[in-house]
Image (cartoon, rainbow, N blue to C red):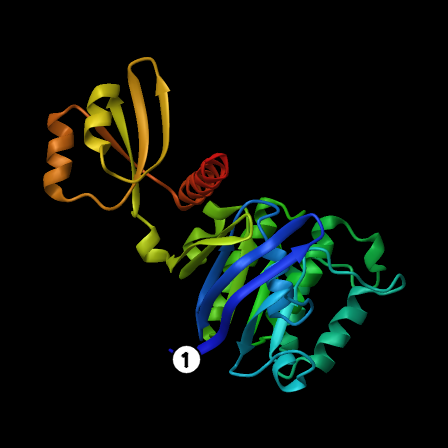
Amino acid sequence: MSVVLSAHGLSKSFPRTTALDDVSFELEEGKVYGLLGRNGSGKTTLMSILSAQGFATRGTFTVFGQAAYENAAVLNRICFVRESQQYPNDAKPSHAFEAGRLFFPNWDETLAASLMDEFQLPLHTRIKKLSRGQLSAVGIIIGMASRAELTFFDEPYLGLDAVARQVFYDRLLADYAEHPRTIILSSHLIDEVANLLEHVLVLDRGRLILDAAADDVRGSAVTVVGDAVAVAAFTDGRDVIHSEHLGRVTSATIMGRLSSEERRGMAAAGLDLAPVSLQQLVVRASQHAAARENTGRAA
């Protein structure tokens, strides 16, 4: 597949913090990416830069092989649905959608109308009077109906109930199947969106700590549970990213896939094996990265 976006050494510094620290990766055409990480990890900052709505302190990136800033040929192929999107005080959803029709050359009015109905969106109420969920629906409709070749969704479901979130996931997947494009979905509801994702990027404290195909990530870690001595013996020399102890019982999450022989050895030692969900893996990997950074500072 062709590369849609290429980032090299992106960093963003503010007076009191570093939001991004030497981030490099590539996005391929026609994939759904998950941009994951805890609040404050740098996700929104990164998407703002990549959509040419913000500037990096250091580093470079190209979109469709070109510089994005002040480049209309690139920008009208990008849609960034911001979690905190601002609109004029007197703007209504109908005005936002009219702007979308004018700006995005692939705008699909039929899809937009269908989504307006499904989300039961009041078109002629001022946006500042909308609920948090209705405001999210405005962004979702623009992001999907734009059919932009590169679409960023920044926590797009805030305020939506479970039914409305499922409508979004189902419609996004169905439309993506019919009209493939590159989609970057930022989310903290990781297990809810896990089945949508083909590739995972995980940020922690501004650093990219995981960049891998979702199929490779799934099953890349397991949790071993059992007698503390037996668990310690089995995990010795392995990459342990989290452990918990309760009396003589230890639970340890380790990176790596286990062979059939290793699994038989675990069973013989009386150890149990538990799968690790994508959300658990992201949480544990972030905690592990933070612990290593703190250890390094202490040293």
Residue nearest the observer in this picture, 72 or 147: 72
**Residue 149 falls left or right of residue 285:** right
Q: Residue furthest front?
A: 299
Give the secondary structure at mark 1. Answer: loop
Q: Which quarter of the figure has residue 284?
A: top left
Q: Using the image, determine if residue 264 lies above or below residue 117.
A: above
Left/right placement of residue 136 relative to residue 246 reads right
Say if 38 sits above or below 45 in the image: above
Q: Position of residue 30 (x, y in %)?
A: 44, 73
Q: Residue at x 67, y 70 (%)?
A: 113
Q: Is residue 89 above or below residue 71?
A: above
Most distant residue in the right direction: 90
Residue 166 position, x and y percent, is 54, 52
Q: Quadrant of the N terminus?
A: bottom left
Residue at 16% across, 31% down:
266
Depth check: give the residue in front, 246 or 207. Answer: 207
The residue sitting at 62% across, 79% down in the picture is 68
Residue underneath mark 1: 2
Q: Check disc 1: other Cα within 10 Å, few if <14, some if 14-19, many if 20+.
A: few
